[in-house]
Image: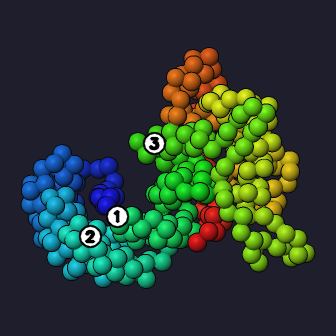
Amino acid sequence: MKKALLLLVLVPLFFYGQTTNEERAFAKAVEAIQLMHSGQIDESIRLLKEAQRLDPERVDYTYELAVAHYLKEDYEGAIKILKKIINHKDASPLFFQLLGNSYSLSGNSAKAFQTYEAGLKRFPNSGILYLEKGNVHWMKEEFDKALTFYERGIKADPSFPSNYYRAAIIYLNSTEEVWGMIYGEIFMNLERNTQRTADMSRWLYETYRSEINIGNNTISVSFSRNAIINADNFSESNELRLPFGVGIYEPTLLISLLSENTINIHTLNRIRTNFIENYFKLGHDKTHPNILFSYKKQIKEAGHLEAYNYWILMKGDEDGFLDWYYENEEKWNNFVEWFLENPLVIDETNKFFSGQY
């Protein structure tokens, strides 16, 4: 289960000639966290205890002390500390996450799950606690159950990236890759420069390659097998609407690749560009609004969709990306500058979730 290290949110100042206990405690905590980063956990613990004594009202010093025990793999020690402060008025969802993770790594997954549930009662919109509830099932390879909590986390806390990441992995390894393609790309926009971003780039590329088939006079796509019709598929005028994957995504993708005879990073750039054009041309944005597709339309209108497409898929074909890059360096640099200033905005009023759970 992912480690839950949270550093104190400290202003980048160091106090010299501290005159109050609070100032001395703060300085010790800053040093302690630096030591923790460098692996000197025991010395970090000593300084955090001194900070506690100097300023006992600051519960975050106690939390960081629990983090230090967690990093030492002293999970029982972390649990003992956290149980004393979990109901503190200044506790955050991260307190519940760290306590739950400590229970989990000490072999008590049931108690971990209960801890995350207790945290969600206090912080009902905490994406990180939904993530950890899902991770309990993930560790047991109960992926359908895990997905339920990742989806709820996306809905409750849409700007938190990790639920998109885990949900995308599950969907990309299912018959409903359509949701993995969307969630995976949203994740890459929220968490742009990590190993997880690179992994997702590769997985998206590989999924395109495996699920688009071009043969002799035949083209097929397979990103969804959900063709179940229920009450949700009828509009107010009683018009039948097929599920999104088979009714919207796949047909739009099909007409976007009709002129191609192979799938690689270069043809996928054209296919993805055609897809956005066709999605809006066919009016799907009215019946199935999607913040990712709207954002890509914005990128296209700014003149950067080609570079964006190569960024999304670059780890799937690094040689192909480099070939393009060396011929389009100025185009790439302009995109990067625009991209940094114009991120995908996701919040309570601008979000997307599949609605599958």
> Vertical placement of 181 versus 63: above or below?
above
- Mark 1 vs mark 3, CA separation in Å: 20 Å
Q: Could you tell me if the residues under marks 2 and 1 are in contact, i.e. CB atoms within 8 Å?
A: yes
Furthest toward the top, the residue is 327
Indicate which label's residue lies in the foreground, 1 or 3. Answer: 1
Q: Which residue is mark 1?
A: 139
Dot 2 alpha-carbon crowd within 10 angstroms: few under 14, some 14 to 19, many 20 or more: some
- Mark 2 vs mark 1, CA separation in Å: 10 Å
Q: Position of residue 118 (x, y in %)?
A: 37, 82
Q: Position of residue 242 (x, y in %)?
A: 78, 64
What residue lies at 73% left-to-right and 57% top-to-bottom? 246
Mark 2 / mark 3, whichever is N-terminal: 2
Label 3: which secondary element = helix
Q: Which residue is mark 3?
A: 199
Asked which colour scheme the image uses, the reply is rainbow
Q: Is residue 158 left or right of residue 106?
A: right
Indicate which label's residue lies in the foreground, 2 or 1. Answer: 1
Mark 1 / mark 3, whichever is N-terminal: 1
Dot 1 alpha-carbon crowd within 10 angstroms: few under 14, some 14 to 19, many 20 or more: few
